[in-house]
Amino acid sequence: MASFALGCGGGAGGAGIERMATTTKITAPQQTKVASGTSLSFNIAVTSPGATPGGMVQLFDGTAALGSGLALTNGAASISTSLLTDGTHQISAKYLGDSGTLPSQSGAVSVTVTGTTTVGITTSPASSNSNVTFGLTIN
């Protein structure tokens, strides 16, 4: 299981209220190489000293947003998807902040989705007394 987190330093908020720094962490599924169509679950945790972050978190594949934002519950959110295309994906989460906490973004976890191959084999002649030999190579 791989997980990565990056934090955001403190800063001044509006109306004299200082917003707290946060750290966003994304945890990848145990299997990071899966067949196309497999459902993958990602867990996101946002922490802050002295505050429980609320608001929304957004999942990204590289720079492309995946779906809409997810609401945090007690600083956590989970999402499952089977819609990733074939190839390697760099999945990260961005916490959007709230009135008491600053935004932050996780590091990326790498997930590889592989295509599936269906092979049909027909023999000729179809005699029950004949031997059939074939070879198959899949790269």
Image: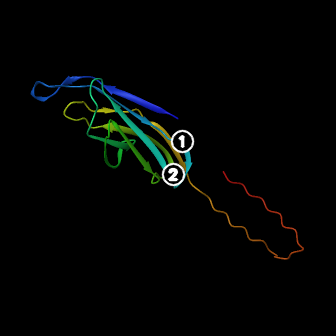
On the image, numbered disc 2 is attached to which residue? 86
- Disc ID at residue 49: none
Above or below, 123 against 47 in this view is below
Tag 2 secondary structure? loop
Residue 5, quarter of picture = top left
Viewed as shown, does residue 21 lie left or right of 112? Answer: left
Above or below, 56 against 129 in this view is above
Which of marks 1 and 2 precedes in the sequence? 1
> Residue 14: horizontal and vertical position, in percent?
12, 29
On the image, numbered disc 1 is attached to which residue? 32
> Residue 1: horizontal and vertical position, in percent?
52, 35
Identity of the amino acid at label 1?
Thr
Q: Crowding near pointer 2: few (<14 within 10 Å), some, many (20+)?
A: some
Identity of the amino acid at label 2?
Asp
Q: Crowding near pointer 1: few (<14 within 10 Å), some, many (20+)?
A: some
C-alpha distance separating marks 2 and 1: 13 Å
- Residue nearest the viewer, comparing 29 with 54: 54
> Residue 49: horizontal and vertical position, in percent?
30, 23
Viewed as shown, does residue 99 lie left or right of 115? Answer: left
In the image, farthest residue toward the front: 74
Residue 135, quarter of picture = bottom right
Viewed as shown, does residue 123 lie left or right of 84? Answer: right
Task: Kindly identify the residue that appears in the image at 49 percent across and 51 percent down.
Answer: 39
